[in-house]
Image (cartoon, coloured by chain):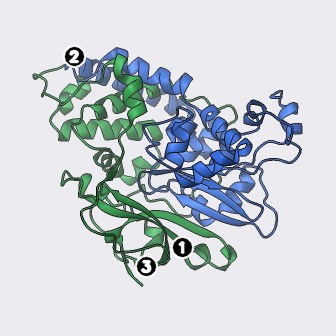
Chain colours: A green, B blue
Amino acid sequence: MDGPHDLGGKPGFGPVVPEPNEPVFHDAWEKRAFALTLAMGFTGTWTIDTSRHARERIPPADYLTIGYYRVWLEGLCTLLKEHDLASADEIASGKSAAPPVPVKRILKASDVAATLAKGGPASREPDAPARFGVGDRVRTLAAGVDHHTRLPAYVRGQIGTIAQVHGCHVFADTNAHGRGECPTWLYGVAFDAATVFGPSRAGDSLHLDLWEPYLEPA
Amino acid sequence: MAGEEHGNGHHRGHDHDHDYSELDETELRVRALESLLIEKGYVDPAALDELIETYETRVGPRNGAAVVARAWSDPAFMQALRNNATAAIATLGFTGRQGEHMVAVENTANTHNMVVCTLCSCYPWPVLGLPPVWYKSPPYRARAVSDPRGVLTEFGVTLPQGTNIRVWDSTAEVRYLVIPMRPDGTEEMREEQLATLVTRDSMIGTGLALTPDKARAQGLL
């Protein structure tokens, strides 16, 4: 989806301004929004891809201006409503007006360290051989799509070379929409930066991790 | 600092007073949301505190610095990182969320690596902690791929002529850790001292490891 999140190569955003001695969080509410998002993720009601897509659907003018944890907050509210865990009125009032919906699991404080250390690997056993091998030349899809995808616009329709075969991974494009993990071969693909961004970039390269359906032989 | 936040798109487009009223409103919204989710029983408030505590105090770039210092000191560990970075990093105790599939990319005299997530904010949490605002903001996400040298200038870094830049856009669940070049004059240094030279930015690729002189000037050595 050509949402406001797809920022690679977009002009006009000005310089990067690093903040000396930046704190991990800038405001108390950021900490809570961060922790609420993680804790609700652990309930297993939606996937990380679904939550990324919820943020990408924020109207562009808002997405680009409200700040990072506001984006998380809006994304979380969208997910709660769309999965019927809370209504808009409940979210606004902070008061429950309906019984809770059962969720798969609730993160306990005593389980936080072990749960974080375990993580959630995206690799899966393959059920078909990989179509491409290291050194193969591939062309990325030229057209945009109307769903969540992880092929950025700046490399659409470009020729690259398979540099790594990462294995089969959960396919973000289906997993974001509740259509299953659909394990799909994932490749590290190298692109010539001069081809994508012009001759001043001669010698540089761009490396992206792209799933097999984004690629065709070139 | 308001000016810097504007530059990063942190609160871009709002004047100062408006910032504050909006902040209060956001704070109230988050408070309401938290009490709702606690009342519904979906979240345990003690778990929220624990999550925050973890990333504020326990998981951060010192972890990654330990990985880099080990890689500089121990060729077998460097080789293990090349073979399977996830497994090698796990031997130092750094595993899990947002670091399930690690790849280490090495800077050399001819090649400089830089990591970005143009689509969101993917970042190797177990070794670097949570990303800084600039990493998550439009200017970096837009220009790291199209103008990495310009971005490096904004970080005060100029690479030698002839250095090629590899930009790693973290588009899937693979997470990248840059292994910066070991500074000259560090041959006699122990692993723990070497780790003090390894800045967060040097592991993202927007900085270089500190020279011993610079580290001394900053009171790190």
Residue for badge 3: A138
Label 2 and label 3: CA atoms lie apart by 52 Å
Give the vertical position of A211 relative to A74 (above or below).
below
In the displayed orientation, state which residue is furthest to the bottom.
A218
Q: Residue at x 57, y 38 (%)?
A: B128
In the displayed orientation, state which residue is furthest to the left.
A99
Residue for badge 2: B39
Q: Amino acid at mark 1?
A: Phe
Front residue of this view, candidates A109 and A118: A118
Query: Could you tell whether A2 is left or right of A102 in the image?
Result: right
In the displayed orientation, state which residue is furthest to the front.
B76
Dot 2 falls on a residue whose secondary structure is helix
Q: Residue at x 34, y 74 (%)?
A: A131
- Given this view, does label 2 or label 3 mark the residue nearer the observer? 3
Where residue B180 appears, as percent x and y from the top left, is: 71, 50
Where residue B62 appears, as percent x and y from the top left, is: 64, 32
Q: Earlier in the sequence, mark 1 or mark 3?
A: 3
Residue for badge 1: A191
- Given this view, does label 1 or label 2 mark the residue nearer the observer? 1
